[in-house]
Image (cartoon, grey):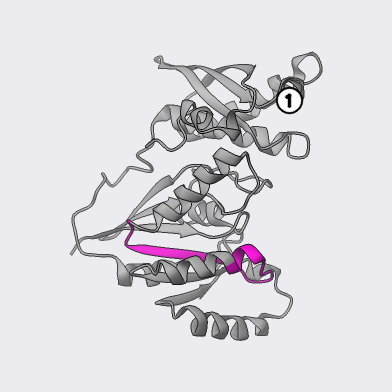
Amino acid sequence: MKKTGTIALVGRPNVGKSTLMNALLGENLSIVSPKAQTTRHRIIGVLSQGDNQFLFVDTPGQADIQGKALNRLLDRTAMGAMADVDIVLWLVDAVRWTDVDEAVLKRLLRQRPKCLGVVLNKIDRMRDKAGLLPLMGRLQQQVEPDFIVPLSALKKANLDVLRGELEKYLPAGEWTYDPDTLTPHSGEFLVAEQIRQQLFLRLNQELPYACTVTVDQMTEAVDHYEIHATIWVNRASHKGIVIGKQGQGLKALGQAAGKRLEALFDKPMNLNLWVKVRDGWADHEDGIQSFGYGATE
């Protein structure tokens, strides 16, 4: 009997949602960086295994970090994802509890999902694993989840246990996607995300949060992809940070993004990048809408 279901990964920024989804898929689909709230969209990853098709939804972390309008959009995206899924996976850092975790807990209690699983992530950082039992007991009492699984997304430890729990709660039904589908997102969307990841990885300390990427043109030739993309920054002063001295920063960023994209698309990339300024785009609703935030990718 075939089963399929949508599973939303929710939790505070940098708790490991994107890392967990990538580990479950076996592919680096959802972008990961040291910056909190790297994820801005609902990223959908498809895992077809045996009779089961898991539709994972990676959601933005919830915290007031980015521009005012963008932050409101991320919050709506994260909370909206819980309303129309079969299973909600709430990720909690096994070694660090914050006020944001407390806020997410309160929201989950108000907006109780029909199936709620708790994932205690980063157990590889625990010096004494005996501390897991009191934490699991407290969350069991507070939340009464359908299951709790301790694991390490980074080390890919205990993933089989989590998949086993998810299988129990997947609804019966025909698969939504073909077995070889990794994601329903467009190629342009994936290109923009991979470029944005390199921005955050390479310029983690220097670059503010309010930058985004648009793909102006993407064409497939016999032996390569031709891509033209624009990096948008929030202030004129940020443009030089991205370009770097004599353009070396932008060149290195393009090379790193190109390697990731070649691995993802299995074809060479000719990546052409430009940097432009749109003042204060992240602070206004029309600004974030003009870049496609809030739309279905």
Which image quarter is the N terminus in?
bottom left
Whether residue 81 is visible here, answered yes or no, is yes
Amino acid beneath label 1: His
Q: Is residue 292 above or below residue 57?
A: above
Q: Is residue 151 above or below residue 180?
A: below
Q: Where is residue 177 shown, x and y percent of the image?
A: 26, 45
Q: Where is residue 286 shown, x and y percent of the image?
A: 49, 28
Residue extending farthest right = 245
Residue at position x 53%, y 34% in the image:
193
Whether residue 266 is visible here, answered yes or no, is no
Q: Quadrant of residue 219?
A: top left
Q: Is residue 53 above or below residue 259?
A: below
Q: Is residue 235 above or below residue 42?
A: above
Q: Where is residue 222 shown, x and y percent of the image?
A: 39, 15
- As for residue 94 lying within the magenta part, the answer is yes
**99 or 58: nearer the eye?**
99
Q: Where is residue 259 shown, x and y percent of the image?
A: 59, 29
Residue at position x 67%, y 82% in the image:
131
- As for residue 192 lying within the magenta part, the answer is no
Which image quarter is the C terminus in?
top left
Residue at position x 61%, y 23% in the image:
232
Mark 1: few/some/many CA within 10 Å (<14, 14-19, 20+): some
Total marks drawn? 1
Mark 1 sits on what residue?
238
Q: Quadrant of residue 136?
A: bottom right
Q: Is residue 236 left or right of residue 212?
A: right
**Magenta stretch in the rendered image:** 84-102
Q: Quadrant of residue 292?
A: top left
Q: Secondary structure at mark 1?
A: helix
